[in-house]
Each structure stands twice: as structure tokens, then as C-alpha cells.
Image (cartoon, rainbow, N blue to C red):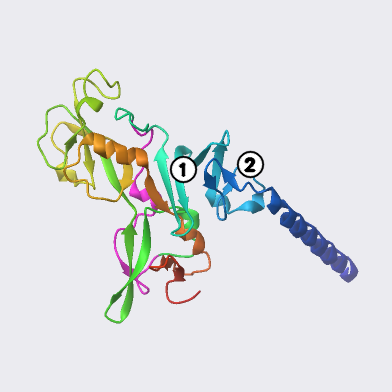
Amino acid sequence: MARLLFAGYIALLLLLLVFQNSNCKDTNLCAPSCGNHTISYPFSLKSDPLNCGNPFYTLHCEKNTSTVLYLDSRKYYVQAINYNNLTIRVVDAGVIKNDCSSLPHFSLTYARLGNSRSAYTVTTTTMTGLDYIRFPYTWFQYKETRRKWIPEYKPLPLSQMMIFINCANPVNSPLYVETGTCLNGEKSSNVSLLRRSYVNVGGMKASDLMELCRLERMTLLPVKDYKNMSYKEIHSQLAYGFELSWHNSRCRRCPYGCYIDDSNRKHCVGGQN
């Protein structure tokens, strides 16, 4: 029996060595790019061998020209990947540049991307090193600040909420930006001609929703000041795309999560690296 176990152990070691060697060779088969985007770890393409990247960061390449990210099976075109600050910029497949009547195909909320809007300390954090499995992408990055002698970690927003609203009656409120001819009238078939269309940028409370108005969909925009912007100007930012962080991919060995310093370097909460 002991000899059989020893033989089995040796056979398992040989199999692991063969698998490891094959993986090392397979790295030459990893696609270096798709269109204008460089593809490096943790990213890989769906057509790549399994060892090319982290499976939670798989991208798709269409006709070797367009790089696609699927979030919950929903399609977003990749506009840029920044390997220095650990961000990826994407745009909903339904949004078309210079066509203000085009709308996102899908709703996307903070909750899908790591719903954390408050600061925490090492004694109050609920983050773990496995957060990258639940939230491989987030709409923020944690930064360290000092609160007396206790380090505090605050989310730095990369994107902000945009809400599409339809109303039966005209609305006069600074929270509502009228979409004008883009989504009202004969030019657009996206909304009923009997209703008026608005957007809100930055979020709103339930009490801010006017009577006979309803929320149609939500999406994300780049973080900036949208005050006094027209809907066409806001739509151009929508077509530019919003940023997501993939810093959670660096947190796997951090039991309490991690944060990014001003030089875009990763550190584990609590000082463990």
C-alpha cells in the first residue's frame, strides 16, 4: 500500500511539472493587443489560453479592431486601459458618438461595482482580499488619509451617476436637464412623444423625483462639473466613456483589502504586503 501511494505521489508530481511547462510555453500564445489596446495581465482575451490572465478580467476582441468588456453579460466597448493608475474606460454599446438620441442599452448602478460611499479604518473595514471576486471592477479607488493617529481609507470616485427620467409634465428644477430635441419630438423613437425627457447627473433623493415622473435607466459618467452643461454636452461625455478601477486584482493577498497611494502603488490595509 505504501509503495502504491508513493508511486501515485510521484505520478502527480510529474503531471504538475508537465502542466507547468506547458503553461510556460502557452504564454507565447497570449494575444498582446486588440485593435489599439495593449492586453497585459490581469487582462486576457477570451480566445487566449487560460494562463494568460486572471479569468475575472477577460476581454473580447471583435474583428481585431474593437475590445469589449462584458459586465453581467452586458456589452461595453473599451476606450482605454491605463496600466499605471489601474483603470479601464468603457462606453455602453448603445451610445453612439455625435448622436445625442442614442441611449445606453443597459442600466448600471454603484451597487454592481462595489457599493461603498463612506470612509473606513482598519478596525471598521468589511473588505477582504477576496473582494476582487465579488467586485473585479469598482467605480472608485481607496486612498489613505490621516485622521489623528488612525489611518483612514476613503473612496476616490472615478465615475458618477447619470439618471434618465421621463415626465408627463414639464419640470423646472436645477436637478433636471432637459434633453431637448435629442429625446423629445419626432427625431427620437426612444421615448413617448407624450412625455418629456430629462437627465440628472450626480444622483438624487427619492423626494427629488417629481410627480408623474419615472426613472428610465441609470448609467455612469466621468467625474467632472456638469453644472450649466446642455444635454448634448453631457451626452458627449457619455460617449467618451466612464472609468472603472481594477485595483482589486492587486488585493488578493491583502486580508483586509488594499488602497492605492498617490504614485498609484498598491498597499495592504494594516500594513501587510
Rendering coords of residue 190 (x, y %): 30, 24
Q: Which image quadrant: the N terminus?
A: bottom right
Which residue is depicted at the point 29% across and 30% down?
100
In the image, residue 35 above or below residue 170 = below
Would you call the spot at circle 2 few (<14 residues within 10 Å), some (14-19), or many (20 or more)? few
Across and down, in percent, residue 72 comes to: 46, 42
Does 2 lie within the magenta span?
no
Residue closer to the observer: 17 or 45: 45
Secondary structure state at the residue bearing disc 2: loop
Q: Specify whether 268 is left or right of 170.
A: right
Image vertical order of residue 205 relative to residue 152, above or below: above
Which is more toward the observer, 31 or 272? 31
The nearer-to-camera label among 2 and 1 is 1
Amino acid type at mark 2: Ser
Of the numbered discs in the image, which one, if any, rests on residue 47?
A: 2
Q: Which mark is residue 225?
A: none
Q: Using residue 127 as the reference point, say whether residue 217 is left or right of it.
A: left
